[in-house]
Amino acid sequence: MSRVAAYLPIAAVVALAAVVPLVVTSNTVINFLVFTLIVAVAAQGWNLLGGYGGQYSFGHAAFFGTGAYVTALLQTQAGWNPWATVLLGILAGAAVGAVIGFLSFRSGLRGSYFALITLAFAEVFRILANAAGITGGAAGVLIRLDVRPENFQFASRGTFFWVGLAVVAIGLVLTRAIERSRFGAHLVAVRENEDAARALGVDPLRVKLLAITLSAGLTAASGGLYAQYFLFLDAGIAYGAWISVEALVAPIIGGIGTVFGPLVGAVVLQGLGHLTGHLAGEIPGISLVVFGALLILAVAFAPDGATGMAGRLWRRWRRPATPTTTPTATGGERC
Amino acid sequence: MFDPMKPDRRTILKTGAAAFATGVVAAPLVLRAQPAAIKVGVLQPVTGALAHDGQQGRIGAELAIRDINAGGGIKSLGGAKLEMVFGDAKSTPEGGTQEVERMQGEGVVAVVGGYASAICLATTQAAARYDLPYVVDVGVSDQIVRRGLKNTFRIAPGFGTCATQALDNLVRINDAAGKPARTVVLIHEDGLFGSGLAKLLQTELPKRGFEVLETIAHPTPTRDMSNVALQIRAKRPDLVIPSSYYGEYVLLARTMQQQRIRPKAIYAVLNGAASNFRFVKEFPEAANLMMDCNHWHDPRNPKAIALRKEVEARGAFWTYNIPLNYSAMLFLADALERAKSTDRAAVIEALAASTFDGHIMPYGPTKFVDGTNTGAAPVNLQVQGNDIKVIYPDMFADGKPVFPMPA
C-alpha cells in the first residue's frame, strides 16, 4: 500500500465528519458527538497499548485523570492559558504512563497481573486526588465559564466538535503511522509472542514502554478535552473506573488493534446508549438493561468488533460464490 | 350521462381542497384560544448511584406542576399550563449536561433540580451558555452560587449556612437543657461533605465551649463500624457528631445500639439517614432520638401536611427532596406569573427579585443575594417514636427536644 493510499481512508472519514456541524444544527446531537469523540480519543490511547501491544490495561483512568487534572489545575491555580495546559497535561499523562510502565513491565508483569496493577494505580490516584488539598479534594476543580476561543471555550458547540475531531484525526494518523513503522511491527511481535520477539532481537521492555507512554499521552489528551468541555472535575470523574471501562470496551466493540476500531466502537456504544435511552422512554434504568442486552448480542455476533464484521460482510458480498477464500480473510484482519 | 345534481369528481376535489384549506388556515385560530403550554425542564438523577434521591425530587416537581395546572396555570400568560420535560442526569455531570442541551433544544423556559453538587456545578454552567434560568433544588456546595452565574438560583441553604446553623442550634439546645454536653467525638466520611464539615467543626466547636476528643474518618463504602464504635466507647463522649451517607450511618447507629453505647446525644449535620423515614421504619430502635440538622418541610404548613399524606398514601417514603422540589417549582411559577413572559431575561429578572413566600419549607420570604436564598435555613430534627419531628427553631417546631437521651 502506498503512503497516500494508507492515509486516504482517514482523510475521507475526517472530512466527512467535519461536515457534521454544518449540517446538524441540534446542539443536543453535537454535544453527544463531542462526548463520543472525547471517549474515542481515550479509546485510541488504550488501543495503542492494548490492541497493538497486547497489554490490557484496566486503569487508563490514571492517564485520563492526570491529563484532566493537570490541565484544569494549571489553568485555575496558576492562571496559565488552557491551550498550553492541555499540552502540559498530555506530557504529564505520558510521564505517568512511562513511570507505571517502567514499574510494571520491568517486573515482568503480563496479562491479568498487568491489568490488576493498572487498576490499582488508578484507584490509588483516585483516593489521593480525593484527599489532597491541591485537587480541591472531594469538592473538585471548577473551571470558570469564560467563553473566548483563546480560553478554549467556544460560543458554538460545533467548534469544540472540530477541536475534538482534530485530536481524533491525530490519533488516527498516529495509529496508522505506528502500524506502518518498524516500531509497530515490533509491538505486534511482542503482542503475539514476547519470547519469540526477544529471540529476534526486539527489546520488549523498550517497545512496551514507548507504547504505554504514547498510549497514556493520547488518553491524557482526552482528559484535557473533558476538563475544557465540561469545566468540572472531581476524583470520581477523573480517576473513576468509568473511563477505564469506556476506553477498553470501545476498541473491543469497534475492532481491537485496528485504526478505526476505537472510533467506530465509541460511536456505536455511545449511539446505542443514547438510542436505547430514547426508545426505552420513561422507565428509569430500563435503557441500561436494553443497552446491556445489545452489548451481549454485539459481542456474540461480532467477536472481532464492528469493523471486523463489516469486513466479513463486505467480502461475502463481493465474492458470494467463491469457494476458496484467501487465507487472510478470517475476519480478524487488521485494517 | 351528466347529472347536474350529482357532483362530479372535479367539484368534489375543489370543495374538498377548499374545505381543507379553510381547516388549515382556521385551525391556528382555534388553537390560539388555548395558550401554548410552557415547557419546564426537570433534571434529576433517576439512574445510577443517586437514583433514589432523584426519583424523590422528581415526585416533588411533578406534583407541583399538577397543582399549578389544576389551579389555572400561569394566569398572566392566559392560563398557560406547565409541561414537564424530564431529564435523567444519570448521576454524572456529563449526563446532566447532555440533558440540559436536550432541554434547550426542546425550548424549555427554565430548569429545576440537579440534586448533587457535581451535577449542579456542570449543568448550571451549561445552562448559563444559553441564559437559561436554573433553579437548583439541593446542591449544598457553595461554589454553585459563588461563580457569578446570573441564571442560577438555589432555594435551599448551602453548606456554610447549614454548618453555622447546626452549631448555633446545638449550643442553644445544650444551653436550654442546662449544658449537659461538653465533650464530642466526630465521625465523618472522607469525601467532600464529611471532611469539609469535620474540619469546620474541629475549629468551631472549641470556640463554643466543647472539647473535641477524637476525629474518626472512614471511607464510603465501609462495611464494618465495630472499630469506630469501640473507639467511641473508649472515649466516652457526651456527644457523637456523625457526617456520613446513608449506609454507613445506619451501620454505625446499629453497631452503637448493639454495643450499648449511649452518649447523651447523637447529633448529625446534613446526614443521609438521621432524617430518613426508611431508616426510621427499618430500624426504629437504632434511629430513635437521633438528632439531625437538615432540610425539611414546614410541619405547620397545611399544604405540606397534605402533600406528605398524599405521597405516603402512594407508598413512597417522605424525604426532603419532595417539598424542596415542590417549592422550587412553585417559586418558578410565581416568577413566570410576575414576568408575564417566557422571555429568559425577564424570567431571570423576576427570579432575582422574588419575595415568594408560598413555599412549603420552613423558610422566610425568598430573597436572593447573588443566587443564594438568604431566607432559607435548615431546621433541627429528631426521630421520636416512629416520626421525625422538627425540634428547633421554635417557630417551626412540632416537637420538643429529648435531650439528653434517657440512659
Image (tube, coloured by chain):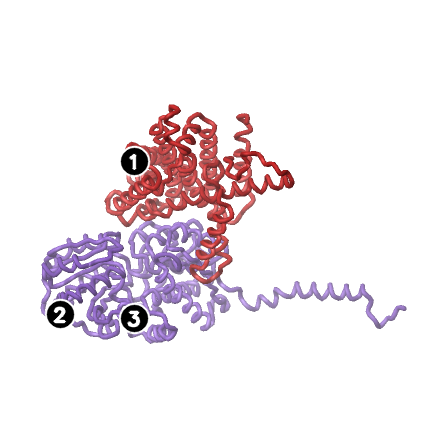
Chain colours: A red, B purple
Q: Residue at x 44, y 25 (%)?
A: A182
In the rendered structure, the residue with mark 3 lies on which chain?
B
Q: Could you confirm whether marks 2 and 1 are on the same chain?
A: no
The reply, left or right, for residue B3 in relation to residue A120 is right
Please give the count of numbered marks on the rendered protein: 3
Give, as a three-letter code, the residue at label 2: Pro
Q: Residue at x 69, y 65 (%)?
A: B22
- Asked whether residue B235 appears in the rendered view, the answer is yes
Q: Nearer the viewer, residue A91 or B101?
A: A91
Q: Could you confirm whether marks 3 and 2 are on the same chain?
A: yes
Percent across and percent down for residue A123 are 29, 45
- How far is mark 2 from mark 1, CA to CA? 57 Å
Q: Helix, strand or loop at disc 1? A: helix
Q: Are marks 3 and 2 in contact (CB under 8 Å)?
A: no
Residue farthest along the top direction in this orientation: A201
Q: Residue at x 23, y 64 (%)?
A: B293
- Asked whether residue A158 appears in the rendered view, the answer is no
Q: Which residue is mark 1?
A: A104
Q: Nearer the viewer, mark 2 or mark 1?
A: 1
The reply, left or right, for residue B404 in relation to residue A173 is left
Q: Which residue is mark 3?
A: B298
Q: Which residue is mark 2?
A: B404
Give, as a three-letter code, the residue at label 1: Ser
